[in-house]
Amino acid sequence: MTEITVEPPEYYPIVEKFFVDGIKEALETLGAELLSVKAGAKPAGSEIRLAFIFEVSREAGFIPLDLDPIVSEVLQKLADDANRKFGKFQNVRFKVVGFRIVERKVEDKKKEARLVIDCPEDLRRTLERLGKGLMIYLRDRDVSFTSLALKVPSDGKPKLSIVLLLEKETAPYEKASLERAIEEKASSYLRTLNADYLSVETRVLDPGDEKVARVLKEREKVEKQAEEIVKDDDIRELMAALGKWPHGN
């Protein structure tokens, strides 16, 4: 969960609503987790000047990027959006006068979830960013999972399949709710990554689903073996002799 501190506190709702979520989402698509936000607001006539300190951690093994120019551009867009949706009705204008990004190392979790990517090579980097962003989003929601798989078919169809495997068995309605949340977040990330031509389909599974799949697979295997046995004349004659198989069949 991102910690938010705003001085003076009366500007907290504005900072949270118009700035934090947008920055958080942009950073997640770049493989960085937003740990905390410290914001200062200073009125100057009809202008409200804002300054930020963002504390972030980066995903291990992710391609390092200079976050400053990206965050600067996103902040400007968010300020414009705040002015359009809120400022013009209150006769105020928001202006971002500065920001600083502080990186903090976070200890690796004992059991790291796997990210699996299966896609054409020209989409790999985009899906890696998407996957890292989704993993940060899920951890921020305290979702315990073992793997996240993203697949785009090699036949050129603009379709992204996402499969999330949870650590524990979960109620069906919770999995359905999580599927909708993932699809919504993934679509938002894809817009940020200029890949929103991909449609998104999500499945959330748990160990219970895995067990069902294994049982069905084993049953199919047993049924196939039974069919082979039935076709064997020697076995049929033996079963008939033991009274276990009707004659003439």
Image (cartoon, helix red, strand yellow):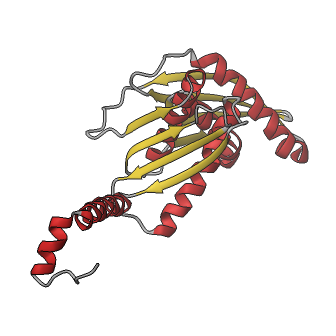
- Can you give x and y, in whole percent of width and height, for residue 48 in the image? 77, 34
Using the rendered view, name the quadrant where residue 235 is placed: bottom left
Using the rendered view, name the quadrant where residue 147 is placed: top left
- Can you give x and y, in whole percent of width and height, for residue 203 in the image? 51, 54
Residue placed most toward the observer, 147 or 56: 147
Where is 247 relative to 163, above or below?
A: below
* Residue found farthest to the left: 242
- Can you give x and y, in whole percent of width and height, for residue 115 in the image? 42, 36
Where is 46 relative to 90, above or below?
A: above
In the image: residue 2, left or right of residue 69: left
In the image: residue 86, left or right of residue 215: right
In the image: residue 49, left or right of residue 123: right
Residue placed most toward the observer, 214 or 201: 214
- Can you give x and y, in whole percent of width and height, for residue 54 in the image? 54, 29
Q: Quadrant of the C terminus?
A: bottom left
Where is 218 relative to 28, above or below?
A: below
Total numbered labels placed on residues in the image: 0
Residue at 85% in and 33% down = 45
**Residue 48 visible at all:** no
Residue at 19% in and 71% down = 236
Residue at 13% in and 85% down = 243
* Residue found farthest to the front: 248
Residue placed most toward the observer, 143 or 230: 230
**Residue 87 visible at all:** yes
Using the rendered view, name the quadrant where residue 62 is placed: top left
In the image: residue 103, left or right of residue 153: left
